[in-house]
Structures are given as structure tokens and as C-alpha cells.
């Protein structure tokens, strides 16, 4: 078996066993979890939950909501299930085998109130040097971003929300793919520094939503010459603050 590390996230509140090599939950997973604002009683789906980095952090933040993660990789799914037990969340968090390339209906689950995803950032094998074998599935979307967005829009009820973190240069593609089934777009840019372009965007859409697009204030992650993270980013990563959508 590949080496597994035993890590702590969300200021130590989440215990996360994950592979030492390959895809490991990091900043994107933490921001996705912080962007989840599910109220008490809500049912939330994460597509491609991996070992559970975002899934468990979101569940720790939103203690009144129920969470379901789906994952196609057998080893990652096993770790997600183990991590759910380790964190004492079995009463309201589950991880199921599933693949965004298959119809949502095959899961035989009712539509969710909200869906989260951190889709692979690339879907063109000619666009970058191939990542290592351990990271290939997490970096390269075999069925393209279209399959992920199609799955997410089917997975939520009318009026439900879809929240995605992705590369900033794919914002146009995200909005185009979401637009046929969703609207009321909200976009929050994520900048590494205040004086450089955004590298990530958090996008939230409402299924059948009709409100105008809203561009929200950016999150700045670092200050030059300062601490590792800005005070706002540090508070979010520690679980002391959320990425609000209002």
C-alpha cells in the first residue's frame, strides 16, 4: 500500500489520512469548504471528494447539514470512509462510489440542496506536461469540465446551489456550461497577492436562478513581506471565518 500520512486541517479540528504522494487536499479544498453555507437540515453533495479534505471540513463548519461525497477511485474512497469514522461524523456524512461521467440518476438519490466540486483543472492532454501518475486523475478531467458541470446541475433541486473552485482562466467556460440550467451567478476571485491577477475563482450558481451576476470582493491570500497568509485568509483557513456569499 502507498504511504499514508495522518494530517490535521481546519486548525486541528479535522483529522485527514491521505496519500503521501499524488493528490493531497490543500488550499483549494479548504476554500471550497469555507464557501459552503448550507443551513441546518440541508443535504450537500461533493463530487470527487477524494480522501475527504473538503467534505470533512465543510461538515465540521456546518454542523446541522448532512453531507454525501462521491468518489470513483477505490483507494481514495476507502480513505474518505475511514476519515469519516475517525472524525466521528458517520451520523451525517457518507462517501459513495460514483463517477461524474455517469448519470446522477444511477446513484438513486434524491436531488441535493447544494453541490460542491473542485474539478480537475485540465482536460486537454496537450495543454501541459503530463503530471505524475498519482496526480493524473485529480489534475486531468477525462470527460472534460462539461461532464462535471452537467453532473452537478442534475444533482441539485430547483433553487439549489452549485459551488465550484477552479482556475481563473476557465471562468468563461464555467459560466457558459452552467448557464443553460443555472443562473444568479456569484463570482469571488482568489488572488495570491493584491498586485497580481487572480489564479482561482469560486463560482456559485443557483439552479433556475435569474438574478444578475455579482462579482464579489476578492480574497487576497498573501501580503508581500508579511506573514504566510493575510489575516482574512488565515481566519478562513483556521475555520474562524467563512467565505460569505452576501
Image: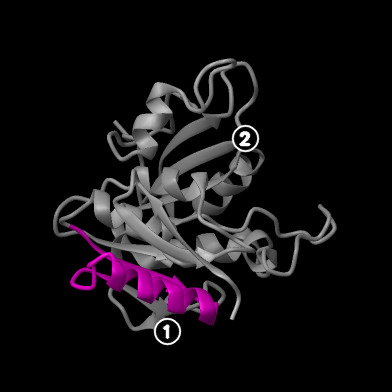
Q: Which comes before the other along the chain, label 1 or label 2?
A: 1
What crowding class fits label 1: few (fewer than 14 Cα within 10 Å), some (14-19), or many (20 or more)?
A: few
Instruction: Give above or below for 46 relative to 216.
Output: below
The image shows residue 209 at horizontal and vertical percentages of 35, 46
Whole-percent x, y for residue 126 in the image: 85, 58
Residue at mark 1: 106
- Taking the magenta stretch, the answer to whether it contains residue 108 is no
For the N terminus, the image quarter is bottom right
Q: CA distance from mark 1 to mark 2?
A: 35 Å
Asked whether residue 75 is drawn in magenta, I would say: yes
Q: Is residue 100 above or below residue 169?
A: below
Q: Label 2: which residue?
A: 199
Q: Position of residue 190 (x, y in %)?
A: 52, 32
Say whether residue 122 is left or right of residue 33.
Answer: right
SS for dot 1:
helix
Q: Which quadrant holds the C terminus?
A: top left
Q: Which residues are magenta?
A: 65-93
Amino acid at each position: 500500500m502507498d504511504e499514508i500520512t495522518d494530517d490535521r486541517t481546519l486548525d486541528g479540528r479535522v483529522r485527514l489520512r491521505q496519500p503521501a504522494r499524488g493528490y493531497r487536499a490543500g488550499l483549494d479544498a479548504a476554500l471550497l469548504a469555507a464557501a459552503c453555507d448550507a443551513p441546518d437540515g440541508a443535504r450537500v453533495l461533493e463530487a470527487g471528494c477524494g480522501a475527504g479534505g473538503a467534505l470533512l471540513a465543510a461538515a465540521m463548519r456546518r454542523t446541522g447539514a448532512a453531507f454525501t461525497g462521491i468518489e470513483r477511485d477505490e483507494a481514495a474512497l476507502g480513505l474518505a470512509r475511514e476519515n469519516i469514522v475517525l472524525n466521528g461524523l458517520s451520523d451525517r456524512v457518507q462517501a459513495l462510489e460514483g463517477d461524474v461521467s455517469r448519470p446522477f440518476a444511477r446513484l438513486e438519490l434524491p436531488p441535493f440542496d447544494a453541490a460542491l466540486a473542485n474539478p480537475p483543472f485540465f482536460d486537454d492532454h496537450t495543454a501541459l506536461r503530463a503530471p505524475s501518475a498519482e496526480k493524473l486523475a485529480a489534475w486531468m478531467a477525462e470527460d472534460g469540465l462539461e461532464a462535471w458541470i452537467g453532473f452537478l446541475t442534475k444533482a441539485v433541486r430547483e433553487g439549489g446551489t452549485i459551488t465550484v473552485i477552479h482556475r481563473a482562466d476557465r471562468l468563461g467556460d464555467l459560466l457558459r456550461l452552467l448557464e443553460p440550467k443555472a443562473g444568479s451567478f456569484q463570482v469571488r476571485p482568489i488572488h495570491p497577492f493584491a498586485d497580481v491577477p487572480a489564479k482561482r475563482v469560486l463560482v456559485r450558481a443557483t439552479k433556475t436562478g435569474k438574478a444578475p451576476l455579482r462579482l464579489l470582493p476578492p480574497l487576497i491570500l498573501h501580503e508581500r513581506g508579511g506573514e504566510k497568509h493575510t489575516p482574512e485568509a488565515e481566519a478562513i483557513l483556521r475555520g474562524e471565518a467563512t467565505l460569505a456569499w452576501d
